[in-house]
Image (spheres, helix red, strand yellow):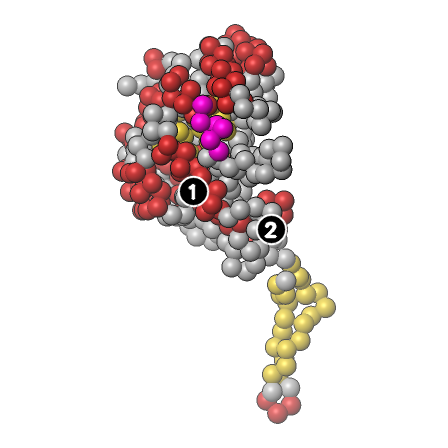
Amino acid sequence: MIAVGRTLTLVAGGAVALTVRSDAQTMSFEEYDPPSSLVVPEHRVTRAKYPFIDVHSHQSLSADYQRLSREMDAMNMRAMVNLSGRTGEALATAVRNAQAAGAGRFVFFANLSFSGIDDPQWGANAAAQLERDVKAGARGLKIFKNLGLDLKDRSGKRVPVDDPRLDPVWRKAGELRIPVLIHTAEPRQFFEPHDKTNERWLELKERPERARPPAEYPSWATIIGEQHRVFRKHPRTTFINAHLGWLGGDLAHLGALMDSLPNMYTEIGAVLAELGRQPRFAKQFLTKYQDRVLFGKDSYQPTEYHTYFRVLETADEYFDYYRRRHAFWKMYGLALPDEVLKKIYYKNALRIIPGLDASAFPP
């Protein structure tokens, strides 16, 4: 707790006594959030400089597409990838409805059903279902974080990310030439002790269910290592490593990984705060790997995109992120060159995600 309203009183003998007034205010660390007194140039950006594709969104299959289209137009989002496409008839129906509402604007990635994973034929059956889903309109496959964390087989054993039972699915995605956007593990700090040395202490205090204690989960390095082995084992399959692979705070490591895995792309959903606090190095990284990074947001809140635009497009200094528990630090703009912006905003997605309308974007 922080106490304010203290006074110093001179007493006999020259001693100084500390007293606390009765109106003293106390506040928690979570409450302390002073506005910056720094006066610097500001360029608030509510509309992206170029049309963009959000490759990491989650929407209801019964979404209001007219409302979404209006919101997308306001911020210059040309296409949205709904990663919660499900599978089978639910996916097929959603694709038909979205196409009727706005052809080419709404793209779906299929999801896997892990039911029956103990069946020796599960892998072949899952691969066959993925092929049917692609014929029904799916443009990719999304793997959620339950794989490697909470998913267990009939014996109660955790299913690792590199479980060989999934190999037929990875191979099928490569054969179909669709990308696999895969979310593996969580931020490394969620696996570390929740103490004063943990940089995400505030987030874990507000959301204690996000902690991954060692008594219940393997280490972060173990799970991430499983993911990387999948990428290496299936070089003909294109993988989009979600959330900068949780290496946004160690871009040199991420760069080395990308150098060794030419089939791995990444996206910036929910990790902008990492880039915005290291503007010079992040700009170097995004410039070097400009052909391998895609735009993603994750949770859909239209006003939050404005911070993405400001970080990527401007040279502004010391401005707020939109969610304090993710970043109690300030953001700095990267002022990316136009060609780098175009690749992140839409060119890279057009190259690796089939079925997007390239004519809707500038060359």
The percent coordinates of residue 356 (x first, y second) are 39, 15
Q: State the mark number for residue 215.
A: 2
Question: Which corner quadrant holds the C terminus?
Answer: top left
Q: Is residue 13 above or below residue 156?
A: below
- Residue 189 in view, yes or no: yes
- Residue at 52 percent across and 55 percent down: it is 198
Q: Which quadrant holds residue 209?
A: top right
Query: Which segment is the magenta one?
Result: 163-168
- Residue at 34 percent across and 13 percent down: it is 359
Q: Amino acid at mark 1?
A: Gly
Which of the two residues, 252 or 62, is positioned nearer the viewer here?
252
Q: Earlier in the sequence, mark 1 or mark 2?
A: 2
The percent coordinates of residue 80 (x first, y second) are 47, 21
Disc 1 crowd, CA 10 A, few/some/many (<14, 14-19, 20+): some
Q: State the mark number for residue 153.
A: none
SS for tag 2? Answer: loop
Does the magenta run of residues contain 167? Answer: yes
- Residue 308 in view, yes or no: no
Q: Main secondary structure of the magenta part?
A: helix
